[in-house]
Image (tube, grey):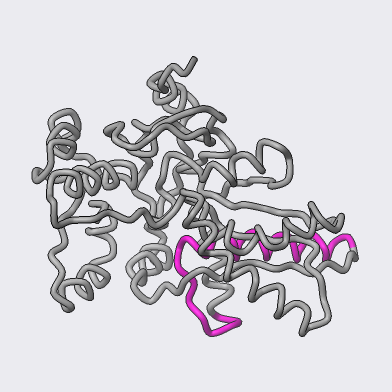
Amino acid sequence: MVKISYQQKPYRRSLMELWGASVTPSPSTETAAGRSILERHPDSLGSLGIAISEAVEVAATNEDTKYSLGSVLNHVLLHQTVVGQEALAQMEMAGEEPDIVIGCVGGGSNYAGLAFPFLRRVFQEGAKTRFLAVEPTACPSITKGIYAYDFGDTAKMTPLVKMHTLGHSFVPAGIHAGGLRYHGMAPLVSALAQAGYIEAMAYPQNAVFAAAVQFARHEGIVPAPETAHAVRAAIDEALRCKETGERKVILFNFSGHGHFDLAAYDDYLRGALLDYEYPETEVAKALQELPVVK
């Protein structure tokens, strides 16, 4: 489990341990990849890229262990499209068609799952739907990264994939949206963004949590910090329509609840939540380590 999430989200760890799991914060001393990171950065908060490196190493060195990646790769995005297929049916029942489809993006699977079935209508039927992927300013893989071949993990164990990336050595700040702390973006989402079919925007976490609190107080549902990025964008789109007098149907993916993220809400309500915007200089530094592909 990524170290910062291990610290920030103790009840997720408690549930796993309740059902018999052993949970180790990453980077750890249990793998060569983890030890290498800790030698260079003893206070590392970890990242999804580092955790993937450690997980792949454990699977590769133990015959009784398998590893299944839960985001980014094509087969995961395909499995997630059941969400979009259900949304298509629900929109038909409502007699509406979305003008804009919004979702948060970290690795890209939850957003692709919702958006891809609607994108099919764009390609096959000429639909005019707009697609908006929302990421944190602390980990802006599409909005500040580049479209290039890179490794999917920090220790360079995974195959190269062409994607929007901040560089495999990039370690984002310790924001509460742990599921969005990944250096790259799914190749399919990246290709569609590069081709202009998907737009991307980034928000700081205080603006995101303000939207999450507003949503919770009106709808009675507490969004996960990751999901709250989509909530923020949906609210902003609705406010723009209110200003212009336009009528738009806004579809967004409520990808998870925040019942195990109440410590983050406590920080926000106490005014202790910090905004992070990753400096361009640090992004450039990480991008210098991209592999050379000829």
Residue sitting at the far front:
63
**Towards the viewer: 165 or 242:** 165
Chain part drawn in magenta: 217-244
**Towards the viewer: 117 or 23:** 117
Location of residue 7 by image quarter: bottom left
Seen at 47% across and 18% down, the residue is 293
- Residue 239 position in % (x across, y down): 76, 64
- Residue 46 position in % (x across, y down): 26, 44
Seen at 45% across and 28% down, the residue is 283
Vertical relation: 245 (above or below) 156: below
Seen at 83% across and 81% down, the residue is 95
Residue sitting at the far left:
29
Give the overall secondary structure of the magenta segment.
helix
- Residue 51 position in % (x across, y down): 27, 47
* The N terminus lies in quadrant: bottom left
The question of residue 172 being in magenta is answered with: no
Quick check: 70 left or right of 78? Answer: left
Quick check: 123 left or right of 31? Answer: right
Vertical relation: 91 (above or below) 13: below
Vertical relation: 208 (above or below) 193: below
- Residue 183 position in % (x across, y down): 42, 39
**Towards the viewer: 261 or 133:** 133
- How many labels sit on residues? 0
The question of residue 233 being in magenta is answered with: yes
Seen at 23% across and 51% down, the residue is 3
